[in-house]
């Protein structure tokens, strides 16, 4: 919540783990969500919407882990205006230092008639009951009239007044389908203030989707109309075209503070790292020209621009790359660095690693340091995230034990792999494919007996240079359930194999969780020769 003593402070409400996670192909497990939430806390967001606890057992588990493990921000959980949703949200959140229940119901006639198939009277009753029920669990309740910007403003005002009467302290105005334009969105909020005087005693929030590329512009228009909470997501991920990008909101407010007259509590130098972690774990790449965090965001190509910046930075730069943490790719360790130096470097990056985890990280670091002259902060981050995934896989998923692949221009490639399955058994499989990576992917299917179908495959480099670490991001589908996986290695074939096994593992895990209720096991359903 925005501190009530500071009327110019904008609350940053991050919904990467809820709306962001609804992006197609993203399937984060609880451990990965916890890692993102911890980084969001370092970035200084005020509220983390950790998930939609009733949506799946995996969502519940992740919200609970974040409520228990993340200190600082308020932890919020989403709930439809149903008692069971609200009960489940509270059960998942109840161990948080500070918690919020966020409940919503649509107010647009399009949604009322066609999606919910009920009436305005039902919406009046359900909104009242939902907020009252949520307030019976906690003081901090947020209410959203979904599809607000396509709703009748008088009816929305009526529902907002009901939510306030029942004790909601934040009223969020979603532009659910990204349809609004800035002056219209601002006018909608201004009209609500006129129609509902009690709204001045609450925090008005904005939640804008980017279908027409206006999410950030609309959010700021809402702030200028009086809103003091912005809902946004790292790298702008979210339903369809996504949400307002958190990093753009933070830097827009920081850079144009004098004009806008508001500020946030964000630690801007954590922006780049937050973006990288989210991109790596979700498998959603960041476009090179993406505002604030794209790799070209501070690069000057034309001679005139380069000349100007060399003479005086402000000729063509409105922000400093250091302010968003984009300069963090400095050399931190070399091949002679010891365990203590590694622990210290990791600690500077915000990771406290000791005991067996440090030994394991050190082993991986040495492997990489033998092949790479310079190990940078970005390499260490990638390595640590990779170790985290491996630890999760060893607990309850499939993990790659070894692979052999022969590839030549004269013979078709042939691969043999060993995969450790849940329970510890080592399964082996082999296959001849169109290329070495194709052969390995098929051999993994043979070894596990899971008919995984490749849907997306991306390869990139963690840093520049010939000896850069390779990074893969893979999405597979198993019996209709998709899963994403990433892998990091100096050997791109190994990075691909690791990413594929993890994607397969996540798809099977997701299918199991969602299919169990329906009595189906996707691993069994998909078993067979690929
Ligand atoms: O876009 C939307 O309307 C939402 C609500 C649940 C706030 O995400
Ligand atoms: Zn949304």
Image (cartoon, rainbow, N blue to C red):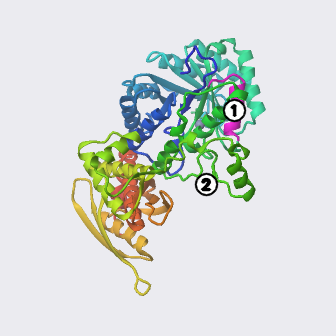
In this orientation, which residue lies closer to the viewer: 215 or 59? 215
Query: Is 222 covered by the magenta stretch?
Result: yes
Picture quadrant where residue 371 is located: bottom left
Q: Residue furthest front?
A: 311
Q: Which residues are magenta?
A: 214-228
| Disc 2: residue Cβ within 8 A of ligand 2's nearest atom | no
Ligand 1 appears in which quadrant? top right
Indicate left or right for 360 with 499 as reference: left
Q: CA distance from mark 2 to mark 1?
A: 23 Å
* 144 in relation to 57, above or below: above
Query: Residue at 36% across / 25% down in the picture?
Result: 95
Indicate left or right for 69 with 227 as reference: left
Secondary structure state at the residue bearing disc 2: loop
Q: Dominant secondary structure of the magenta stretch? A: helix
In this orientation, which residue lies closer to the viewer: 81 or 387? 387
Secondary structure state at the residue bearing disc 1: loop
Residue 33 x, y percent position in the rendering: 42, 41
* 339 in relation to 157, above or below: below
Query: Is 465 covered by the magenta stretch?
Result: no
| Mark 1 surroundings: few (<14), some (14-19) or many (≥20) residues within 10 A | few
Q: Are marks 2 and 1 in contact (CB under 8 Å)?
A: no
- Closer to the chain start, of discs 2 and 1, is 1
Would you name the residue on which mark 2 appears? 288
- Of circles 2 and 1, the one toward us is 1
Query: Residue at 70% across / 44% down in the picture?
Result: 213
Residue 498 x, y percent position in the rendering: 37, 60
In this orientation, which residue lies closer to the viewer: 276 or 245? 276
Would you name the residue on which mark 1 appears? 256
Residue 381 x, y percent position in the rendering: 41, 49
């Amino acid at each position: 919540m925005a501190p009530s003593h500071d009327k110019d402070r904008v609350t940053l409400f991050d919904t990467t783990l809820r709306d962001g996670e609804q992006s197609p192909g993203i399937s984060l497990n609880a451990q990965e969500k916890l890692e993102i939430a911890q980084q969001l806390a370092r970035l200084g967001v005020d509220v983390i919407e950790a998930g939609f606890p009733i949506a799946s057992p995996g969502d519940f588990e992740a919200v609970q882990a974040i409520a228990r493990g993340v200190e600082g921000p308020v932890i919020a959980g989403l709930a439809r205006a149903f008692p069971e949703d609200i009960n489940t949200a509270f059960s998942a959140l109840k161990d948080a230092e500070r918690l919020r229940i966020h409940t919503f119901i649509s107010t647009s006639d399009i949604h009322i008639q066609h999606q919910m198939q009920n009436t305005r009277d039902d919406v009046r009753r359900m909104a009242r009951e939902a907020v009252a029920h949520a307030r019976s669990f906690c003081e901090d309740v947020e209410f959203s009239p979904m599809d607000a910007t396509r709703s009748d403003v008088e009816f929305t005002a009526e529902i907002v007044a009901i939510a306030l009467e029942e004790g909601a302290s934040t009223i969020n105005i979603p532009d659910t389908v990204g349809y609004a334009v800035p002056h219209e969105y601002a006018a909608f909020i201004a009209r609500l203030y006129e129609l509902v005087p009690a709204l001045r005693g609450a925090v008005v929030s904005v939640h804008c989707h980017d279908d027409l590329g206006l999410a950030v512009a609309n959010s700021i228009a809402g702030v200028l109309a009086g809103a003091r909470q912005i809902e946004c997501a790292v790298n702008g991920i979210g339903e369809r075209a996504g949400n307002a990008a958190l990093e753009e909101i933070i830097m827009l407010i920081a850079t144009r503070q004098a004009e806008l007259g508001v500020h946030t509590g964000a630690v801007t130098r954590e922006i780049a790292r937050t973006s990288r972690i989210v991109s790596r774990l979700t498998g959603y790449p960041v476009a090179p020209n993406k505002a604030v965090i794209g790799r070209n965001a501070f690069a000057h190509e034309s001679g005139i621009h380069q000349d100007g910046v060399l003479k005086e930075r402000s000729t063509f730069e409105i922000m400093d790359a250091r302010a968003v943490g984009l300069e963090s790719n400095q050399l931190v360790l070399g091949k002679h660095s010891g365990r203590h130096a590694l622990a210290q470097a990791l600690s500077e990056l915000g990771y406290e690693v000791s005991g067996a985890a440090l030994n394991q990280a050190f082993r991986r670091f040495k492997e990489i340091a033998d092949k790479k002259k310079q190990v940078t902060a970005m390499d260490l981050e990638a390595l640590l995230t990779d170790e985290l995934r491996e630890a999760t896989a060893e607990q309850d998923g499939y993990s790659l034990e070894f692979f052999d692949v022969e590839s030549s221009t004269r013979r078709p490639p042939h691969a043999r792999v060993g995969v450790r399955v849940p329970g510890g058994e080592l399964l082996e499989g082999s296959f001849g494919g169109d290329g070495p990576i194709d052969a390995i992917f098929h051999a993994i299917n043979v070894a596990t007996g899971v008919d995984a179908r490749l849907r997306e495959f991306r390869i990139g480099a963690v840093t520049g240079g010939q000896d850069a670490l390779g990074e893969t991001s893979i999405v597979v589908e198993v019996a209709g359930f998709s899963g994403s996986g990433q892998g990091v290695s100096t050997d791109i074939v190994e990075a691909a194999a690791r990413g594929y096994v993890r994607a397969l593992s996540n798809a099977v895990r997701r299918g199991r969780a969602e299919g169990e209720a329906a009595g189906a096991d996707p691993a069994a359903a998909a078993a067979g020769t690929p």
